[in-house]
Image: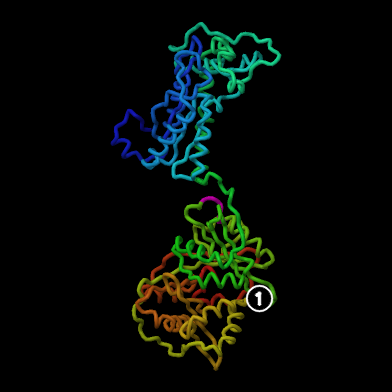
Amino acid sequence: MISGENTSVDWQIHTGAVCVMPIGAYEQHSSFLPLATDTISAEYFARAIAEDLGAALLPALPFGTSLEHAGFRGSISLRPETMMQIVRDLADELERQNFRVLILLNGHGGNFSLGPVARDINRMDRPLKLLLVNHWEHWPAGVACDSTHLGIEVHCGEGETSLMLALRPDLVRPQTVDTAANSDAHPLQQRDLNTFGMGHFSPEGVVGYPSFATVEKGRAIIAGARAPLLAHVRDRLRRLQEQPRYAGTGGIAVRIMGEADIPDGMRLKALAGWNQLEADWRLFLAASPAGCFVAVHNGAVVGSVATIRYRAADATEVAWIGMVLVDPEFRRMGIGTLLLDQALRSVADCASVKLDATPAGKEVYVKRGFVDERPLTRFTHACLPALPASPNSDSQAIADAQLAELLALDRVLFGSDRGRVLRFLHGHGPRAACGIKRAGRLAAYCLSRPGAHFHQIGPCIADTVDEARALTAAALADLVGRPVVIDVPDEQQGFSAWLRSLGFAAQRPFIRMHRGGSGPAGTPEREFAIVGPEFG
């Protein structure tokens, strides 16, 4: 913990991001408790919090909004708007100093302006969050309650006086004054303080029964309040860490993605550093017009997800989920899960649902019933060198006339019809698809496509590592000096070793996962590169 007793250097090297400020009041507490009663209690509990968290402790604000005590000399009140402005100024200053949470430990029930100013600041979703804590809300039940049968306790009562006897017995005078008996048919209630000052309740400024107070009860309050108070604060800090947005997941809606949303999709993928082009988004929208979604907040797109379906020979469908993107400013708000659930609902009729997950995202998918299928590794090369001559010269471009043959072969080898995707890849030019024939028929193939940051190689389907190398070398022939990416199943160790020999480096892993059945078997042992994690 650091405080005003430390130096500026101590504060400079302090690594914590939480600041605690006690807020009290300077108001009458009859003839037996000091004007600073609320400040003293606020300071005690604020220090307990700061020590527990290793936080920065600010000096107490000794004045509060004590309007109801007007007429009692020594009671000095701030206007509510002044109190709110003080909190705003402190929040601005602490945020500039890179604090992320300001805990307002309130010691006075009349500081009603703290709630609105905390809400107003928090609703802006600023880096600094305010946590308002009233210490009396954590007092143990059944302690200092012997006088409850006599009437309400609002001010200077059994509990408050007991607490002061435990905290500062030297400031408590022995001649306490209880609330006088009241026979009114409609006695004043605490809410009446909006109309009637404290003097209407009691000329002595007491609403309660301090004669029942004891130091033992005060110690019991402290002992019983400490643990739940600290637990409450830690829980709220955890919640702020997990979900910093004031509205939580509220205010987020999901709708179908349309062509007009493509610029936002491009913005999201750029923020994530992904490789897609506008044409990739258009492919998703054309293939699955009712299966692509965006999350929106206040009219702005803050997340996306896309699905595409592949039909198997038995008429069942395999769905692929990709493009799960969330604006960084809206992460940790459940938006990715919201989008995933919407995507899953849209493909609920499919026999199998698949995706290629990052290790960071895997836990979310496991919770939705996905299981591991096989690992993959993304390899990249920032500047492809000239390649040695291929040992296999049989690879050649796949002409338009051979496209139907390519699609038919892929249906068998992949296990489902992804013709729309392959036609899209083939359409990128005469060198976008190359193949190897045996006995006059297409037997192996490799396709590629341009991207925002890398030229993507895949799929690559072959019988042997040598064939895969020859096809990939043909696909790479026109890419010398350019950045290239290729996603390879981990079981293809020989192929991966060849890529490394060319200078490719493993960038990150993926885990292919599925929910429901694993889908048509295909021939995964012949797959040396996938299309990409968004398409499978």
Would you say residue 172 sits in the magenta stretch? no
Q: Residue 304 lies in what quarter of the image?
A: bottom right
Would you say residue 335 sits in the magenta stretch? yes
Residue shown at 57%/70% (left/top)? 284
Q: Residues within 10 Å of mark 1 (few under 14, many from 20)?
A: some
- Nearest to the observer: residue 48 or residue 119: 119
Is 464 placed above or below 172 here? below
Residue under label 1, please give it: 312
Q: Position of residue 302 (x, y in %)?
A: 53, 57
Q: Position of residue 13 (x, y in %)?
A: 31, 40
Give the left or right position of residue 479, taking residue 487 as reference.
left
Q: Position of residue 317 (x, y in %)?
A: 66, 71
Is 198 placed above or below 57 here? above
Under circle 1, the secondary element is: loop
Identify residue type, mark 1. Ala
Is 29 placed above or below 411 here? above
Residue shown at 40%/39% (left/top)? 92
Q: Position of residue 461 (x, y in %)?
A: 52, 80
The magenta region covers 332-336
Most distant residue in the top direction: 175
Most distant residue in the bottom direction: 440
Most distant residue in the right direction: 185
Judged by its main secondary structure, the magenta piece is loop
Residue shown at 52%/68% (left/top)? 533
- Nearest to the observer: residue 174 or residue 64: 64
- Nearest to the observer: residue 347 or residue 395: 347
Q: Is residue 536 visible?
A: no
Q: Residue 310 lies in what quarter of the image?
A: bottom right
Quarter of the image with the N terminus is top left
- Nearest to the observer: residue 255 or residue 208: 255
Quarter of the image with the C terminus is bottom right
